[in-house]
Image: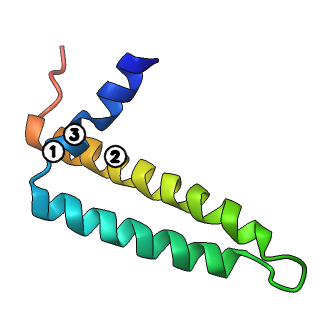
Amino acid sequence: MKNLFAKFFTPIKQLNKGTFRLLFVLSLLFSIIAGILSVDFSHECGELILTIPFWFIIYWLMVRVGLWIYAGFKEGKINKQ
């Protein structure tokens, strides 16, 4: 399990500091805005406490998928045999 987390976060750790800070600030903004938009405030506000971490995780999963796709473009063509 530890190896899986290390493998997942390796491309994120390799980003330069400015890019990581930008992505981190955007992740906070995205998770707060998406959390507020996805919660029905007519019942309870406790849902907001659960939805913000959910959207935070979803954001970083999207960042990781984007980095994986970008790395695929840098690798080149697929070898067809």
> Is 70 above or below relative to 26?
above
Q: Residue at x 64, y 80 (%)?
A: 36
Who's the residue at 70% across and 71% down the image? Answer: 48
Q: Position of residue 61 (x, y in %)?
A: 44, 48
Amino acid at the residue labelled 2: Arg
Please give left or right for residue 24 compared with residue 15 in the image. right
- Residue sitting nearer the eye, 76 or 66: 66
* Helix, strand or loop status at disc 2: helix
Write the residue at 46% across / 17% down: 1
Q: Residue furthest right?
A: 43
Quadrant containing the C terminus is top left
What residue is pinned by disc 3?
A: 11
- How many numbered circles are shown? 3
What's the mark number on residue 50?
Answer: none
Q: Nearer the viewer, mark 3 or mark 1?
A: 3
Q: Secondary structure at mark 1?
A: helix
Figure check: 76 above or below 46: above
Per the model, the C-alpha gap separating discs 2 and 1 is 14 Å
Q: Which residue is mark 2?
A: 64
Q: Which residue is mark 1?
A: 73
Residue at far bottom of view: 42
Residue 76 visible in the current orientation? no
Amino acid at dot 3: Pro
Q: Nearer the viewer, residue 62 or 46?
A: 46
- Percent x, y for residue 73? 15, 44
Query: Sequence order check: which comes first, mark 2 or mark 3?
Result: 3
Considering only order in the chain, which callout, 1 or 3, is on the residue closer to the N terminus? 3
Amino acid at pointer 1: Phe
* 70 displayed left or right of 74: right
Q: Residue at x 16, y 62 (%)?
A: 19
Query: Where 38 sits versus 64, above or below?
Result: below
